[in-house]
Amino acid sequence: MNGTVNGAANGTVKGAASGAANGTVNGTALKVRSWLAFCRLQARAVTVYRADYALGLAGLIIQIYLFRVVWVAVYGEHRTVHGVTLPLQIAYSTIVSLQSWVFMPRASEQIPQRVREGTVAMDLLRPLGFLHQVIACQVGGTAVLLPFALVGLPFAVLAGGAVGPASALAAGEYVIALLVGWAVATLLQAVVGMLAFWTLEVSGPFMIYTAISQFLAGALVPLWFMPEWLRETASVLPFQASSYAPVAIYLGRVQGSGAWVLIGQQVGWAVVVWVILRLVWRRVFRRVTIQGG
């Protein structure tokens, strides 16, 4: 009798454990499929408007050329300024411009439209959380733009200029810093996009954010040319993680332990901004109102 009871109990426990394990695996698989689906969705959206992005790439090359003209004029007869040669500065501007173009916010800019049209209600019912949807869409948009960037790279080099990485180690550190910088930029853009749940439109906030972030990120003027007080301020803010930090490592302006300290700072900001985004989302979720039909 005891053997029968014990066998039944063990069978029940094993069945429950097996069911729980299968449920966890199936839930994870569903989330992975949802992630890939959102990535593909945003990728298709970009390819539908590929002519627009091609024109944007042409505008980027013109911008790179204009940066070169400006820096040539600034340097004049000087070979170096603050220890930075003209070819190095032009290479910096070229790489940063390409990065900024690939990092352009796409998914977060769609949040206001979803809120106004009420489609965010359907987003909340999907198996993938809303924040993960936003990030997955940005992943898809960035991934599909990489081929455009590779096609435009030779033209960008001709219009501006480029130099190789300071070393093989610097190249590897650059890739790591670039990925973390992308994460920081994406999360910051998502935080700004969340304002749509209060304002329904974020064109103004995005313009303010873009102006401040591009300047403090070193996308317009490198941090090494800024006044000391401004450079120190920008170096402790998250914006420089997406532009200055990766390129400074690539060019060898930050080397050795300094490079890893900079990457560690990037990772720290990624965690902090993710926590802020989660807190904002909790507020949003409590007070969300669906606009439209």
Image (cartoon, helix red, strand yellow):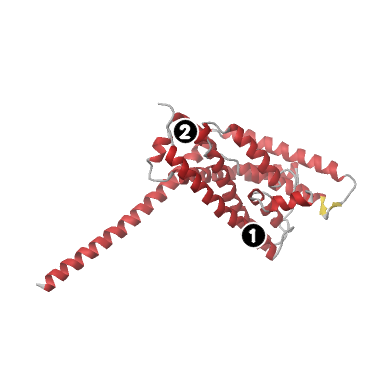
User: Which of these two is toward me, 99 or 61?
Assistant: 99
- State how far apart marks 1 and 2 are (Cα): 39 Å
Left or right: 193 in relation to 152: left
Q: Which residue shows up at 47% across the image and 30% down it?
A: 116
| Secondary element at tag 1 | helix
User: Residue reaching furthest top?
Assistant: 293
Residue topped by disc 1: 173
Mark 1 or 2: the one toward you: 2
Residue 289 x, y percent position in the rendering:
43, 33
Which residue appears at 65% of the width and 48% of the height?
A: 239
Could you tell me which residue is drawn at 52 percent across and 51 percent down? 275
Badge 2 density bin: few <14, some 14–19, many ≥20, Cα 10 Å: many
Residue 98 placed where, x, y %?
66, 44
Q: Residue furthest left?
A: 1
Q: Is residue 103 above or below residue 228?
A: above
Which amino acid type corresponds to the residue marked 1 in the rendered image? Glu
Position of residue 15 in the picture relative to residue 57 (left or right) = left
Q: Which residue is mark 2?
A: 115
Q: Type of residue at label 2? A: Val
Residue at the limit of the structure toward the right, as seen here: 77
Q: Quadrant of residue 118?
A: top left
| Viewer-proximal residue among 128 and 233 | 233
Residue 30 seen in the figure: yes
Q: Position of residue 281 (x, y in %)?
A: 48, 44
Near-viewer residue (162 or 218): 218
Q: Earlier in the sequence, mark 1 or mark 2?
A: 2
Q: Answer yes or no: is residue 39 visible.
A: no
Q: Quadrant for residue 286, please give it.
A: top left
Whether residues under marks 1 and 2 lie with C-beta atoms below 8 angstroms apart, the answer is no
Q: Secondary structure at mark 2?
A: helix
Q: Nearer the viewer, residue 251 or 180?
A: 180
